[in-house]
C-alpha cells in the first residue's frame, strides 16, 4: 500500500526520494509525490497521478540541490487517484505524508475552518490540524505533531517537514510502519526497510505511539506522552541482490524460481535427518508447554490463509490429539470467538503488517492466548508483537502475488506441528517420513520447476482467452487449489474459483460450459480414485480439463502436467509450483503487469 520515504543529510534529497519510492513501488500505488526544502524557506512540491515515471518527467524540469525532503506513493482510500489527492499535502509552512487512515477526519475537518482544502483526503485534514498548532509559532514542530495526533482516531505512519526549519523531519507511527535509517551525516526514513538498502545497515524501528525528531546527525524519540525512548539500533539484513530482478524479466518469475533456495533458508538448522526430528527455537515454548497444547488457531489473509489451511491438514494427520482451526483474519477479528484454554495461535503473514491479521493478533492476546508468528519481514509489527515466532527467511518478496512465502509458510507451520507431536511423544516412526520429505523438498522443488516450466508455458497460452477457471482438489489438494485460483485471478484477471471435488455436485457443476476451463490437482493417495471419478463427472459435462498429477494418468483429458513422483506427502507443494507458473505465463501472454496487478497492494495496512 502507500509508501513513505524521507531524507535529511548532505546529499541530493530528490535523488534519494525517487530511488526510495521506486523501491516501494511493489507495494502498490496509484500516484506519487515528493517535496524538498531549500535553505531560504522555499519548497519544491512535485506530484503526479500514475507511475513514478510520471513524477520523474516533472522532476526533469525541477531539479534541485535540496538536502532535505519527504516522498510518498499513495494507494487511494479517501478520494480518487489524482494529482490533487497525492501526497505530500500542504498546510501553511507544513508538508506532510501519511500512510493509514484517519477515521475521524470529517469531525476534525469541521473545526479547521481557516484552512482552504484542496483535496478529498483525510491526510490533508491531518496536515491542517498539525498546522493549527504550529502556525504563528504556538508549538515547535514535534509538539505540534504530538498535539494533533492526540486528537486523531485511526492509523498512521507520518513524516512532516516545515519550510521554517529545513533541517528536521518529524515522524510518528500508530499501526503503520516507519523505519529510520541512521547513516553518516545523513538520516533516512522509510515505511519499509527495502528503501534503505544500500544506504545504511543501521535501522531504528519506531513503535506505535512514538514520535521522533530527526536531523542529519540525531534521532530523538519520545512517546506521545513526552516520555523519552532510548532508540534500539538494529541491523538491516537484506542486501541489494535480494531486491533486484537478478536477470529475470519479472520479480514474480524470480521469486517462483528461487524457491529451492528460499525453502532451504527456512529449513536451515531446523531439521535433524539422522534423528528424524525438527527443532524450532523461535516459538520459545518449553516441552511441557508444547505437550499441553490442545488447540491451534491459524490466522491469516489471502495466501497466508491458504498456507494455514494446507498446514492444518498435515498437522491433523500426525497430531490427532489436537484440533486445528484456520481462520480468515478479517472475519475472525469481529467474531467474538471463544478461545479454549491450552490454545496457541499461529499468526501468519509475509509482510508482518497486514492490518486485519495484526488486529486478530491483538484480540487473541487480550484473551491471554499464546501467539506465535509465522512471518517473513524481519522487525515487522506482527513479528514484534507476537509472544514468540518463526521467521520463514525467504528474503524480500517484491511481486504482489505471494509465491515463495506460501511454500515456506506451509512448511514452517508443519514443522511447528511436528514439534508439538514430538513433545507429545508421537509413535516412533510416524514423523520420520514427514521430516525426510521436508529435507528433500528444496531439491525436488528445483527439479519440478525445471521439468514443468516449458510445458506449463505452452499450455497456459492455449487457455489464455478463457474468462473463467475452476480449480479442483480433494483433501490436501483442496487448499492448494484455492491458492492456485487466487494466483490466477489476482494477476491474470481470470475469474478463477476453487472447489473441493466433493462439492461439485452440490452446485458448481452447473457452471461447466465452454467459457470455463478446469484445473484439477490429483495427487496419488487414498482419495485418488474418488478424484478420478470427479474428473469424469466434469468431462461428461463438456469440461476442458487440465490435470496436474504425480502419477501415470490414464484418463483422457485435454492436458496433463506431470510432476516428479518422489515426493508423496508434500506433492501439493510441488503442484502449487505448476499453478504459480501457469498464472505467471498466462499473465505475460495477456500482456498484463505481472508484478503490480491493478487495484492490489503488496502489504495491506488498512482494513
Ligand atoms: O503480508 P501477508 O502475508 O499478511 O499478506 C496477506 C495477503 O494480503 C497476501 O497473501 C495476498 O493475498 C497476496 N497478494 C496473494 O498473492
Image: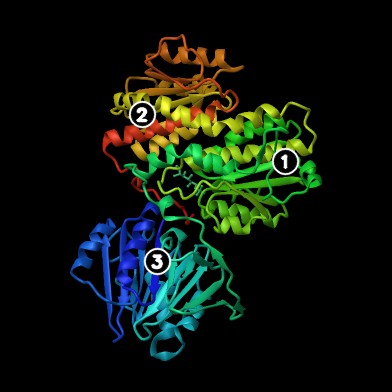
The part of the image, by quadrant, that contains residue 594 is top left
Q: Which quadrant of the rendered structure holds the N terminus?
A: bottom left
Q: Is 115 on the left-hand or right-hand side of 234?
A: left
The residue carrying mark 1 is: 295
Q: Are marks 3 and 1 in contact (CB under 8 Å)?
A: no
Expressed as whole percent of the image width and height from the top left, the position of residue 282 reads 67, 50
Q: Is mark 2 within 8 Å of ligand 1?
A: no
Outermost residue on the bottom side: it is: 137
Outermost residue on the front side: it is: 274
Seen from the viewer's position, the closer of residues 553 and 541 is: 553
Instruction: Find the distance from the CA under tag 3 to the CA under tag 1.
Output: 42 Å
Q: Residue at x 69, y 36 (%)?
A: 418
The residue carrying mark 3 is: 5
Eye-nearest disc, 2 or 1: 1
Eye-nearest disc, 3 or 1: 3
Q: Up-down: is 119 above or below 345? A: below
The residue carrying mark 2 is: 468
The part of the image, by quadrant, that contains residue 578 is top left
Label 2 crowding class (10 Å Cα cut-off): few <14, some 14-19, many 20+? Answer: many
**Mark before the other along the chain sequence, 3 or 1:** 3
Expressed as whole percent of the image width and height from the top left, the position of residue 566 reads 55, 21
Q: Up-down: is 64 above or below 139? A: above
Q: Secondary structure at mark 2?
A: strand
**Mark before the other along the chain sequence, 2 or 1:** 1
Q: How is the image coloured?
A: rainbow
Q: Up-down: is 219 above or below 71? A: below
Q: Residue at x 46, y 24 (%)?
A: 508
Expressed as whole percent of the image width and height from the top left, the position of residue 387 reads 68, 55
**Mark before the other along the chain sequence, 2 or 3:** 3
Amino acid at each position: 500500500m502507500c509508501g513513505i520515504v524521507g531524507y535529511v543529510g548532505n546529499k541530493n534529497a530528490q535523488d534519494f526520494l525517487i530511488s526510495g519510492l521506486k523501491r516501494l513501488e511493489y507495494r502498490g500505488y496509484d500516484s506519487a509525490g515528493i517535496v524538498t526544502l531549500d535553505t531560504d524557506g522555499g519548497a519544491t512540491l512535485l506530484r503526479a497521478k500514475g507511475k513514478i515515471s510520471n513524477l520523474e518527467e516533472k522532476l526533469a524540469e525541477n531539479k534541485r540541490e535540496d538536502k532535505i525532503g519527504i516522498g510518498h506513493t499513495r494507494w487511494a482510500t479517501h478520494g480518487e487517484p489524482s494529482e490533487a489527492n497525492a501526497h505530500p499535502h500542504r498546510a501553511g509552512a507544513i508538508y506532510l505524508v501519511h500512510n493509514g487512515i484517519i477515521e475521524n477526519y470529517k469531525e476534525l475537518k469541521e473545526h479547521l475552518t481557516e484552512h482552504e482544502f484542496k483535496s478529498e483526503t483525510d491526510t490533508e485534514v491531518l496536515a491542517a490540524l498539525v498546522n493549527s498548532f504550529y502556525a504563528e509559532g504556538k508549538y515547535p514542530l514535534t509538539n505540534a505533531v504530538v498535539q494533533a495526533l492526540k486528537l486523531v482516531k485511526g492509523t498512521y505512519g507520518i513524516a512532516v517537514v516545515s519550510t521554517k526549519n529545513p533541517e528536521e523531519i518529524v515522524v510518528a507511527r500508530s499501526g503503520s510502519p516507519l523505519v529510520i535509517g541512521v547513516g553518516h551525516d545523513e538520516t533516512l526514513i522509510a515505511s519499509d526497510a527495502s528503501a534503505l538498502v544500500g544506504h545504511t545497515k543501521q535501522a531504528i524501528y519506531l513503535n506505535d505511539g512514538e514520535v521522533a525528531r530527526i536531523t542529519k546527525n540525531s534521532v530523538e524519540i519520545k512517546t506521545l506522552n513526552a516520555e523519552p525512548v532510548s532508540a534500539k539500533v538494529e541491523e538491516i539484513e537484506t542486501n541489494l541482490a535480494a531486491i533486484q530482478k537478478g536477470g529475470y524479466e519479472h520479480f514474480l518469475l524470480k521469486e517462483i524460481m528461487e524457491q529451492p533456495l528460499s525453502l532451504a533458508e527456512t529449513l536451515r538448522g531446523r531439521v535433524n535427518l539422522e534423528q528424524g526430528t525438527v527443532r524450532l527455537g523461535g516459538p520459545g515454548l518449553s516441552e511441557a508447554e508444547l505437550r499441553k497444547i490442545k488447540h491451534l488457531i491459524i490466522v491469516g489473509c489471502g495466501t497466508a490463509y491458504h498456507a494455514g489451511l494446507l498446514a492444518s491438514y498435515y498437522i491433523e494427520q500426525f497430531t490427532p490429539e489436537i484440533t486445528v482451526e484456520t481462520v480468515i483474519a478479517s472475519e475472525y477479528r469481529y467474531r467474538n470467538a471463544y478461545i479454549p484454554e491450552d490454545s496457541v495461535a499461529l499468526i501468519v503473514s509475509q509482510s508482518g503488517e497486514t492490518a486485519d491479521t495484526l488486529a486478530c493478533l491483538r484480540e487473541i492476546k487480550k484473551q491471554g492466548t499464546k501467539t506465535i508468528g509465522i512471518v517473513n519481514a524481519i522487525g515487522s509489527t506482527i513479528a514484534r508483537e507476537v509472544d514468540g515466532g518463526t521467521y520463514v527467511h525467504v528474503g524480500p518478496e517484491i511481486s504482489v502475488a505471494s509465491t515463495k512465502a506460501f511454500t515456506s509458510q506451509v512448511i514452517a507451520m508443519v514443522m511447528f506441528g511436528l514439534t508439538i507431536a514430538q513433545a507429545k511423544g508421537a509413535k516412533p516412526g510416524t514423523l520420520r517420513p514427514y521430516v525426510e520429505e521436508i529435507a528433500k523438498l528444496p531439491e525436488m522443488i528445483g527439479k519440478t520447476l525445471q521439468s514443468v516450466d516449458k510445458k506449463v508455458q505452452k499450455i497456459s497460452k492455449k487457455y489464455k482467452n478463457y474468462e473463467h477457471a475452476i480449480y479442483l482438489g480433494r483433501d490436501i489438494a483442496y487448499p492448494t487449489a484455492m491458492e492456485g485460483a487466487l494466483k490466477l485471478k489476482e494477476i491474470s484477471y481470470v475469474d478463477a474459483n476453487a472447489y473441493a471435488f466433493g462439492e461439485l455436485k452440490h452446485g458448481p457443476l452447473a457452471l461447466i460450459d465452454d467459457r470455463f476451463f478446469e484445473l484439477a490437482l490429483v495427487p496419488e493417495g487414498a482419495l485418488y480414485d474418488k478424484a478420478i471419478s470427479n474428473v469424469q463427472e466434469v468431462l461428461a459435462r463438456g469440461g476442458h480439463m487440465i490435470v496436474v498429477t504425480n502419477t501415470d494418468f490414464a484418463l483422457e483429458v485435454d492436458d496433463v502436467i506431470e510432476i516428479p513422483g518422489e515426493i508423496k506427502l508434500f506433492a501439493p507443494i510441488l503442484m502449487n509450483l505448476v499453478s504459480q507458473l501457469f498464472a505467471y505465463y498466462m499473465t505475460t501472454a495477456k500482456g498484463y503487469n505481472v508484478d503490480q496487478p491493478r487495484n492490489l497492494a503488496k502489504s495491506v495496512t488498512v482494513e
